[in-house]
Structures are given as C-alpha cells and as structure tokens.
Image: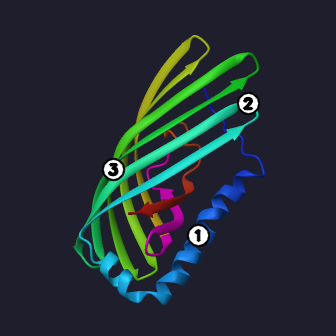
C-alpha cells in the first residue's frame, strides 16, 4: 500500500515563511550581539519542528519536540520524540495514518550559521484504510546541513538507510525547519 500526500502551490509559501523569519532574526542578531552571546551559551535548549497543512481532501500535522545539550560550544547532543498524523480520502476510502517514534541526534557547528547534524530515528507507522489496519516500523539515519540563526535552523537532510519499499518515507531527502527556545 502506498500513501501519497498531495501538495498544492500554497504549501511552498508555508516553507518560505520560516526562511524569511530566519533572515529577520539574523538581522536583529547583528543589532543586539549581547543577547545572542548569552542565548548561545545555554547548555540545555528545547527545540521543536512542526508542520500543519489542510488541502481539499485531507489534513496533515507533525510535531517533533526535543532537548539538546551543549557538550562544547560547537558540539551538541540531544534526543526527541516525533509524531505525524495525516488523513485523506482516496476514491471512496478514508485513510488515516499515525507515525510516531524517537530520535537521538548530534550537531556540529563549524561556523555560527552552519549546522551539520546526524540523527538516528526509530519510526512506527499505523495506517487505517477503510476497514483495513496495517503497521510497520523502520530505522532512519539522517545526515543534514542547515543555515542556523539564534532561534532557527533551516536545511536539508538525507536518509542514509533509505531503501525503496522498506523505509517509511517515499523520498530519502527532506527539508526541515528546527526552532530553538
């Protein structure tokens, strides 16, 4: 069974908004360097990723909260949870899917605005299509690179363990936005 989420042209605007916000935060960073230095020196930081989308015959929601700990100023480790829900109608069948799991990740910051990451995920998927219920699970090892500001990272990650038909995602590469508090 393959699941397909359709994106309409308005979805790309939602992806561009965090990039525009990152540029604004970076601008404020250059005006107020004393706040940036204090904020970057915290050892433990909360982070989250999220997604929300409505379209003509479906709904998508994603949340992935986590914590990171700064081992050194340029090296961070962390862990988190993830949850994704989507539903849509295909012909006369209603499809609902829940994906949940956990991750362990590490960041290396070669410069103030570049973040490289390596993330191990264990994901579990439950799908209900009409009366049929199925479930699967799979690991994922994601290597990523991002542009980072004081409160946000925007980038691209690639699933090294991706195998067609065995992985839970359709594509090994995916964009991401991570927000830090």
Closer to the chain start, of discs 3 and 1, is 1
User: Which label was assigned to residue 109?
Assistant: none
Most prominent secondary structure in the magenta stretch?
A: strand
Q: Residue at x 42, y 55 (%)?
A: 48
Q: Position of residue 33 (x, y in %)?
A: 41, 88
60 horizontally vs 133: left or right: right
Q: Is residue 76 visible?
A: yes
User: Which label was assigned to residue 21?
Assistant: 1
Q: In the structure shown, which secondary structural element does the residue marked by tag 2 occupy?
A: loop
Q: Is residue 123 visible?
A: no
Q: In the structure shown, which secondary structural element does the residue marked by tag 3 occupy?
A: strand
Image: magenta residue range = 146-163
Query: Which image quarter holds the N terminus?
Result: top right
Q: Is residue 16 above or below residue 54?
A: below
Q: Residue at x 52, y 60 (%)?
A: 177
Query: Which image quarter holds the C terminus?
Result: bottom left
Closer to the chain start, of discs 3 and 2, is 2
Was residue 134 drawn as part of the magenta stretch in this picture?
no
Q: Is residue 86 above or below residue 133?
A: below
Was residue 161 drawn as part of the magenta stretch in this picture?
yes
Closer to the chain start, of discs 1 and 2, is 1
């Amino acid at each position: 069974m393959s699941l397909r989420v359709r994106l309409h042209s308005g979805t790309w605007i939602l992806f561009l908004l965090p990039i525009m916000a990152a540029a604004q935060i970076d601008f404020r960073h250059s005006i107020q360097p004393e706040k940036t230095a204090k904020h970057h020196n915290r050892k433990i930081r909360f982070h989250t990723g999220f997604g929300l989308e409505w379209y003509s015959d479906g709904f998508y929601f994603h949340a992935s909260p986590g914590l990171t700990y700064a081992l050194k100023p340029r090296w961070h480790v962390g862990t988190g949870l993830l949850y994704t829900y989507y539903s849509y109608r295909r012909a006369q069948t209603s499809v609902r899917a829940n994906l949940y799991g956990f991750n362990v990740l590490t960041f290396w910051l070669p410069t103030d605005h570049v973040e490289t990451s390596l993330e191990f995920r264990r994901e579990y998927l439950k799908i209900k299509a009409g009366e049929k219920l199925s479930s699967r699970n799979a690991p994922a090892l994601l290597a990523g690179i991002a542009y980072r500001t004081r409160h946000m990272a925007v980038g691209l990650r690639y699933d090294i363990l991706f195998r067609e038909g065995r992985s839970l995602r359709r594509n090994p590469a995916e964009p991401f936005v991570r927000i830090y508090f």
